[in-house]
Image (spheres, helix red, strand yellow):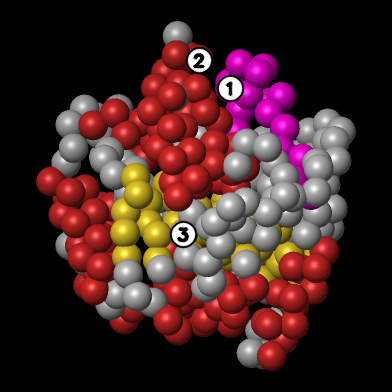
Amino acid sequence: MKVALTMLVVLALGLGGPGCKGPKEENMVNNAPREASVPVPGPRSALPMPVIFAAHGAPILLDDPVWVSELEAWAKALPRPKSILMISAHWEASPTTLGATTPVPLIYDFYGFPPKYYQTRYPAPGATALAARVRELLGKQGLPVADDPQRGLDHGAYVPLVAMYPKADIPVLQLSLPALDPALLVRLGQALAPLRDEGVLIFGSGFLTHNMAFAFRPGIPAWARAFDDWVADALTRFDVEALKTFQTSAPDARLALPTWEHFAPLLVAVGAAAPNHTRTSFPVLGFWMDGAFTKRSVQLD
């Protein structure tokens, strides 16, 4: 019964379950990832690359054919990235920190699941060159950078990647959230924006609504729809100032996000798109199990 309830929470929230560990409680399992093949360029190319934000789901959602097919279709419609810079809600570290630049084990930052969910592998090639370029760009803007060479991808990073790029043949680098400071997060994104012209997919992974108190409540609350609609409108108009002040500008912000680390990667994405934004689209829509957690994912061209 305990496992069943855990899985219900996961499906409702798209999280690592009620046992999901915070950034300081991560458990790295010592598996041995294989080296992936060298990426082969796809038929599509376009610069600048879009910037994206995905509702990242939880490991169990990789068994949901609808969600996986939505992410697969989205990835196929995107230009093929040369590399991916991932910003997940599940890693906060100051100053901005670069994760592993060579293949290391994943971080299974959840507990209470059947064994198979701890056997997922995502042995993407290392991204040493991308890390060097990120250090250069942030340094030019006076933004300090640290390194954590043993820090693997957490579930907020690898779960959407498994669905979107299952071959694990594109170099991936994860970057930490330096602080829950809207202005700093947008500035971080702006500093990273030149990567778009270099074939890098800047990928934010989080949630636009994330209130654990509503995990077991059926029905989509009015406040969840109102907040989701407000964010969609602000993104469509690309009102960066409104998004930065969402805690006071948006309806029911405190209900939608009692803590807002899951919204933070969106602000990095908005900053990265700001210099030449032309269009906002929403490749994935809806609410998990018709509950309080929006699946809305965002593409900024």
Question: At label 1, which amino acid type do we have?
Answer: Gly
Task: Give the CA distance from mark 3 to mark 2.
Answer: 33 Å
Residue 282: in magenta span:
no
- In terms of depth relative to the viewer, which is nearer, 104 or 85? 85
Question: At label 2, which amino acid type do we have?
Answer: Val
- In the image, what residue occupies the spot 52% across and 66% down? 46
Name the side, left or right, on which 292 lies relative to 109: left
- In the image, what residue occupies the spot 61% across and 28% down? 111
The answer to which of marks 1 and 3 sits earlier in the sequence is: 3
Q: Secondary structure at mark 3?
A: strand
Instruction: Kindly check if marks 1 and 2 are in contact, taking CB atoms under 8 A apart as contact.
Output: yes
Task: Give the CA distance from mark 1 to mark 3.
Answer: 30 Å
Counting from the top left corner in percent of width and height, residue 187 is at 51, 82
Span of residues in magenta? 109-125
The answer to which of marks 3 and 2 sits earlier in the sequence is: 2
Main secondary-structure element of the magenta-colored stretch: loop
The C terminus - image quarter: bottom left
- In the image, what residue occupies the spot 52% across and 28% down? 62
Residue holding disc 1:
112
Residue holding disc 2:
3
Query: Callout 3: 10 Å neighbours few (<14), some, many (20+)?
Result: many
- In the image, what residue occupies the spot 43% across and 24% down? 65
The numbered disc on residue 52 is: 3
Q: Secondary structure at mark 2?
A: helix
- 80 is higher (above) or lower (below) than 242: above
Counting from the top left corner in percent of width and height, residue 5 is at 42, 18
- In terms of depth relative to the viewer, which is nearer, 109 or 38? 38
User: In the displayed image of the protein, which residue is found farthest to the top?
Assistant: 1
- 100 is higher (above) or lower (below) than 164: below
Which of discs 3 and 2 lies nearer the camera? The answer is 3
Task: Give the CA distance from mark 1 to mark 2.
Answer: 7 Å
- Quarter-wise, where is residue 132 in the image? bottom right
